[in-house]
Each structure stands twice: as C-alpha cells, then as structure tokens.
Image (spheres, rainbow, N blue to C red):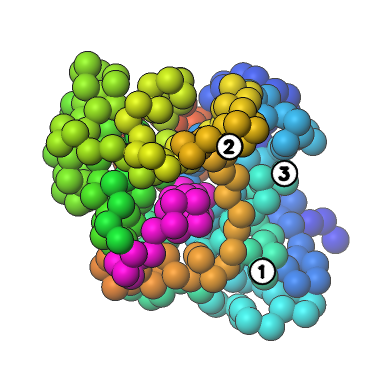
Amino acid sequence: MAAKLMHAVQYERYGGGPDGLKHVEVPIPVPKKSEVLIRIEAVSINPVDWKIQKGEIKPIFPRKFPHIPGTDLAGEVVEVGPGVRNFATGDKVVAMLNHLYGGGLAEFAVVKESAMAKRPDELSAAETAALPVAALTALQALTQSAGIKLDGSSPQANILITAASGGVGHYAVQLAKLGNAHVTATCGARNIEFIKSLGADEVIDYRTPEGTALQSPSGKKYDAVIHCATGIPWSTFEPQLSSKGKVIDLTPGFGAMLTFAFKMLTLSNKRLVPLLMSFKAENLEYLLKLMKEGKLKTVVDSKYPLSRAEEAWARSISGHATGKIIVEP
C-alpha cells in the first residue's frame, strides 16, 4: 500500500536562499516510540533556519539532503506512537523539532513527546508557534545568564537589549519588565514607539551616535546586555557595562568566543557569555502560562501560506521583520 503524501518545502544543497527552496510531495512521517504525529497549523521562521541553509553553522548542524527546514510549530496531534503517555489524538500542542533534522515547513511532522507542550484553548496556533526558539532564548538569557527573577523579586538590574524589535528581542523586552528590570533597547527609528509599547524604559535608534555607542540616555551602565544583533565589537560594549556587567551573545561568532576565553583567562569582572539555547518543556509551559495570563504576547510581522514559504524565507533574510514571521500550511 502506497504511503500517503504531504506537501513540504525542502532544499537539496547549501546556499540558494529563497530560490533554493523547492515544493515537493513526500510521505507523511510515521511516529515511533515516544513520538507523536502533528498536523501543522503554523510554523515560525527563525534566522537560524536560513543560516543553516547558508552553511554558516555547518560544524554544529551539518545537513543531510534533501532537508525540510523549520523547527517551531503549533498544531494538532493526529497519531501517537508507542509509549506516549501525556498526549492524545486531538490535543492542541506547541512543539520544537531538532535543528539537525528539521521538518517544520510541511503539512505534518513527527515530534518527540518530550519536545512539546499542550496549547491553551485561548491561544492561537500562530502566536504560540512563534515561542520555542525566540521566547525560550530570551527566557534563558534573562533568567539563567543574567540572573533575573521574573516574579520581580530580584534587585532592579539595568538591561540593554539590542535589536529589540526582532523575534528574540521583542520577547526579551517583555520578560525583562516582568523581572523589574530597567530596560534600554535599540531598534530602528520606525520601531521606537512599538518597543516603548512593550514596556522599554529607554529606546535608542541604533543609527544615531548614541545608538552606535550604545549609550543609555539616562547615563546608566548595563548589568547585562541581551545581544540579539550582530557586528558590534566588545570594545563598544565594555565602557557601557557596570563593574560586573555581562554581554550575553545570542549569535556568538569566532571573535566572540575568543573574547569569552580571554575574559575568563584574565579573570575579568566584565564578561562576554555565549548562549546556546537548550529546550525544556517546563520552560515552554511557563511561557504559555504567561501568554494565557496576558503577561506576554507574540507580535506577528507577517503570515504566508506554505505555498509561498520562499517569501517568508526572504522576509526573514531581509532583517526587517518586526516580531515573528509565520507560515501556515
């Protein structure tokens, strides 16, 4: 008996950008032990998706081709594999696929039971599909790396968030304010009012002299920087940090790793801290709870049908998205 087919988007080699994405019909995957099959309702695009396609992080995530990209999704459980205990057919869920295997830009995907959480009825597929990589990264950076307690019980810290209008940045602003932080944020001029609406105390146009120097308008030194942008050298950060300030680099390159090692060797109180997000289902459940309570929101930049996934890909590559980009099969 022939396997049932589904529409998917894949690429067959490194490079190619949006033109490298191909629309294909492939077999619907079958869940194995401790896995479920999800009918995808929404998937979000992250910069790491097209960076993997470009081969920028080949040593960490080598590809096997052809490859269906996309990791963050929301949908409905349609089949459960052996040993699945906490999910049943019909459950609405949010899930994160492994970057190594992907599979999100499709009509169906198989997900490990440990990599998903139930989605509250009040929340849409689009707003929750945006959470896994971006919001979990912001949460980990703030709570683990910067030591911010989101119940507001920690002493007020001065936090700088670069590229605050992007996927990670717009979540980081909201979460930092829950943690009683004084938030300074950078973004383009067109997004200043948007970032203020999320709660930022000070917003700087990154194209101005103050923005280039990352200077707080109130003269505050930063206890932590949630660094969502690229191309800013350590020499720009260092004079703006408090005596024990940290730069938490979410996209660390080779230079950042050298700076990290040097600061460790010299026992410097000012540190650069590379961050690689690790998935924990309880953290995703926590974010969904905050969203249900109205304490966290997803800002959707744009939505595309799966038939126009290459347009979503191009939008992400442009670097001009405000919030998250969603593809809906």
**Percent coordinates x, y for residue 88 in the rendering:** 61, 80
The image's mark for residue 267 is: 2
- The answer to which of 84 and 194 lies nearer the viewer is 194
Query: At numbered mark 3, what does the secondary structure look like: helix, strand or loop?
Result: loop
Lateral position of residue 34 relative to residue 168, left or right? right
Q: Which residues are magenta?
A: 131-154
Distance between the alpha carbons at the discs numbered 2 and 3: 35 Å
Q: Quadrant of the N terminus?
A: bottom right
Q: Is residue 57 left or right of residue 296?
A: right
Query: Looking at numbered disc 1 in the image, what kind of residue is underneath it?
Result: Ser
Q: Which residue is mark 3?
A: 100
Query: Which residue is pictured at 56% across the width and 43% down the height?
Result: 275
Looking at the rendered structure, the kind of residue marked 3 is Leu
- Look at the picture and state if 235 lies above or below 163: above
> Is label 1 in contact with label 3 (beta carbons under 8 Å)?
no
Q: How many marks?
A: 3
**Which dot, 2 or 1, sits closer to the camera?**
2
Q: Which residue matches tag 1? A: 114
Going from N to C along the chain, the mark reached first, 2 or 3, is 3
Residue 209 found in image quarter: top left
- Tags 2 and 1 in contact by the CB under 8 Å rule? no
Where residue 141 sits in the image (x, y, percent)? 47, 50
Q: Is residue 293 visible?
A: yes
- Which three-letter amino acid code belongs to the residue tagged 2? Leu
Label 1, secondary structure: give it: helix
